[in-house]
Each structure stands twice: as C-alpha cells, then as structure tokens.
Amino acid sequence: MLHRFVFLLIFFASASPLFAQNMKVLQFRELTNDLTANLHGTSKTDENGEVAALIKIVTPETGFTFDGGSLGIVAVEQKAGEIWLYVPRRAQRLTITHAAFGVLRNYSYPVSVEGAKTYEMLLDIGTGCYATITAPVAKSEVYIDNEFVGQVPVYNKYLNYGKHTIQAVNGKFEGTVEMYVTSDKKTMNIDIDMKDMSPVYGDVRVLVDNNADIYFGGKKVANGLWDTQLKEGNYVIETRKADHENSKTSFTVVRQKKNQITAIAPSPYTGYLRVYTRPQGVAAINNKGMAVDLSEQTPLLIGSHQFQFQKKGYVPQAREYTIARNQVQNDTIELQHIEYFKKFAFYFGGGLNLRSLIGVTGFIGATIFNNDLQFSYTFGLMKSKEVNVYDANWDYIGAQKYRMHTLAVKYGYQIVVGRQFAITPQVGFLQNTIKSSIVAGSQKFADGASSKCIAVGVKLLAVPVKHLYIFAQPEFAIALSKDATFQKVAAESNFSTGGFAAQVGIMAAF
C-alpha cells in the first residue's frame, strides 16, 4: 500500500509540468451579439463604478484561480461547462493557475478589452480538444458516449483524448460516428451523416392496468395506454402510481411488426389489520358494503378504511382505521346486546280486535320501569245481526244493525322473560258504545247506548327486530253497568258487553 501511495505522488509531481506545458488558449474573441456583460442581473461594476468586461472561459474543468495583475479581477462565477470571469476595462494580461494542470502565466489578450462587452476564451488544458458537432437534420439531439449534450449545432464541446461514440437523433433519423481524439488536433469539426431508420422500427402498444403512469427513458410518456414506434431491440418501461410500488417490464421490439406489451402494474402499498371480536362471528362490513374477514392478519391498502361491525341481536359499531405501509394494526371490538325492552319506552301501534263484534284497534302507551300504561280506541268493523225494533205498544217501527266502538285504558306490569320476549299482565277499564244503522224504517233506536266493563288480561310481546314488536293481547271483560237500551239490543243481537276477546297486531317502540 505504501509503495502505491509513493507512486501516485511521483506521478502527479511529474505530471504537473507536463500539464502546465500543454495548457494554452486556443481562441479569444469578442462575442459581438452577446449582451450578457451589459444586462441587468448579469453585469458587474469594478471598484471605479464602471461596467466590467465579461470573459466566458470555456473549459470542462473547475478549480482554476485567476490573477489580473495590477488591475485585478472583478468577480468569478462557475457555470456549467464554462467560467465567467469579470475584468476591468483595459485589462491586458491574465494568469491562470490550476493545482493539476499548472500555470498559464501572463497571457496577453489579443484584442482590446472594453467594458460592458462579452468575450470568449477557449482554454486548452492539454487533455483533449474542442469540437463543433453538426448534422444535416435540424434540432437533432446529440449524445456523446450516451450522454446528451444538446441539439445541433453543438459548439466548443471539449473531448478528452481517446475513443468517443457520437450520435445524432431526430425521430427516425439517426447517425453515429466513432472516432479517436488525439493530441495532434486542438479543434475539430464533426459532421454526422444521418439516415432514415424507419425500416428497423416496429409499432408498439403498451397497456397497463389500474390506470398507471407509463415511464420510458425516465420520462412520463402516457397513462394506461402508450402507442409509439421504437427501433428493434430490447427495452424497459416502468409503471408508477401514487402510493404504489414501481414496476418494471422488459420487452423486445421486432421491426415492421405490431408489438403489444402488457406491462406489470404497480403494486399498491399495503398494511395489515387484525380485529378480535366479542362475541365471535361478528361481520366486518367495509364502506362498499362488502364483508371482510379481519379475524386473521388482513392486507389492506394504505390510507383510511371504515368498517361497520355487526351481528344480529347486538348493537353495531363503526370504526375507522388508518393503515400505514407495512405496519400491523390490532384492535378489539366488543359488541353489546341490543336492549329490546328499555326502562323508558314510548310505543304506538294497532291491530285487529277479535270479539263478538270484530273491530280494529289503535293505541299508544309508555313503559316506565316495567310499569305499562296504555290507551286504545277500537273502531267497530263488523255489524250485528238485524234487530227488529217495536214501540211501547209493540207496533213494528223498523229494523237496525249495530257496530260497537270501545275506549279503553289499561295498566300492566311488564315481565321480561327473554331478550326478545315479555309478558305484561293487565287490568283495564273499557267503555263500549254502539252505533246503529237503519235497515228498515226511518227512526234510529239505541244509537249511542253504552256499557262499562272491567277487563283482566295479558299482553304477550315478541321482538323480531329492534323497535318493532308483535303482540297478542287476550283478555276477559266483566260488565259493570250498561244502558237499558244497550242491554236490550245486546240481548236481541249476537254480541255481548263482556266476555273473552283478543287483540293481535304490531307496534313500534322507542
């Protein structure tokens, strides 16, 4: 290792005089159409307040220092491929120093240097030559050793000694030159002959799923579908999409053929979610209405996900999760049983009243700490059989039929015997009123007659779904009092003031 280090020291020590001997100015001229030295933002003034001259030193290297003698240097700026050296007007000499390439001492400007003007210097560092590259097709792109250097014409491109491949491309027109740059030339002109390469091209269609972006040569060329023409050979395209892993696809183009390529779509970034539930068998429904099995570690796209956890008989829960890339998230969901019978509930409903004269019943009520209070009204639907009506002298005056309406208030105590079943023993007060309709004759009899009863029964409740109850309400009514006309009509017809009855129907509770 030591002997290698010593060798390098000797090499650079011996090389410095060689580089110093070869560093020279190949060309110095005024750029009459270049106003950089006199434009706002790029012009500079010397210590006397006068606009300085600008020398654009063309060189492929950096690390130079400059000495302008007694007049000095105004400023130095490093640019791509050149150095901008600002000097005072009437500057005459310049010394250029570099650690590797030595010293170019007291170079005399071949023309008078004037302020606010721009000049160009081609500096030869002794490792190559300057080339001007042209091609017959305008705006052709130039590549030197596969590196893009600009569009033709390319002026003063420094080429190191050795072999170079220079290519000009414009659409299907191409040209390539391979050449050796030797020390016997300091400047050279290279004209690249170009040919139409259409016969070696093929049609190319690239398809990719998921509406991904297609990149070719590091540039985005299409989205989802790319139609182009490429020269025969092997290529690689890349597909990209936000929050996805980029994918690459290699393919071969055959000349004069239609080449269709299905590119590999980018893989979405994913994380993992696992949810433990109590009880088991809880369904996890995503925001698209689809059931997802989260009992195992489940891959999900990164970002926000909403789930509804539900099971029959339990109160559902909604949860939102933010999934991070390659991260595992665990959670536990415990569902609570649905309370079908609440401590405080308001209800209403209706049903069919099955008695001697059938009717339809509507009711409202409330339950407070199992105490149930209910109000109902039954509208008679079924008519009694025909009743003949006579006056006090038993003279026939007509025939009538009757319907019976009932207003009732009932109290009970609700006993829950299962999560979805309850029994409510009841006691209530009923007022029955009959309404007559004339069959023959013209005079109504006993219209509005009433009777009062006390009823004892039970309300049976079944809850198929939350808030909806199915009920059956059998009862036995005992008459307390009744109008004489009511009693007479009941005796002549087919209905009674009391006895067994049953209501069946549905109700909603909140």
Image (spheres, grey):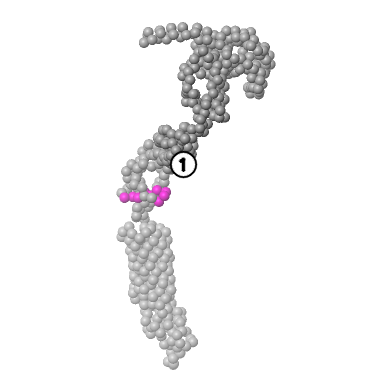
Q: Secondary structure at mark 1?
A: strand
Q: Nearer the viewer, residue 140 or 69?
A: 140
- Determine if the magenta segment contains residue 287: yes
Task: Quarter of the image for the C terminus: give it.
Answer: bottom left
Q: Is residue 214 visible?
A: no
Instruction: Tell me if 502 is positioned left or right of 73 in this view.
Output: left
Q: Is residue 119 above or below residue 442?
A: above
Q: Is residue 352 visible?
A: yes
Q: Is residue 308 above or below residue 175?
A: below
Q: Quadrant of residue 390?
A: bottom left
Query: Which residue is labeled 1 in the image?
Result: 225
At label 1, the amino acid type is Leu
The residue drawn where x is 53% and y is 18% is 158
The residue drawn where x is 49% and y is 15% is 182
Q: Nearer the viewer, residue 320 or 381?
A: 320
Range covered by the magenta-colored residues:
281-289
Task: Give how far across and how far down residue 210 sits, in percent.
Answer: 43, 43
Q: Nearer the viewer, residue 383 or 23?
A: 23
Task: Give how far across and how far down residue 342 sits, in percent.
Answer: 38, 57
- Determine if the magenta segment contains residue 120: no
Instruction: Tell me if 64 is positioned left or right of 87 in this view.
Output: left
Q: Is residue 77 above or below residue 402?
A: above
Total residue callouts: 1
Task: Give how far across and how far down residue 417 sits, in percent.
Answer: 31, 60
The residue drawn where x is 43% and y is 69% is 362
Task: Give how far across and how far down residue 323 sits, in percent.
Answer: 40, 40
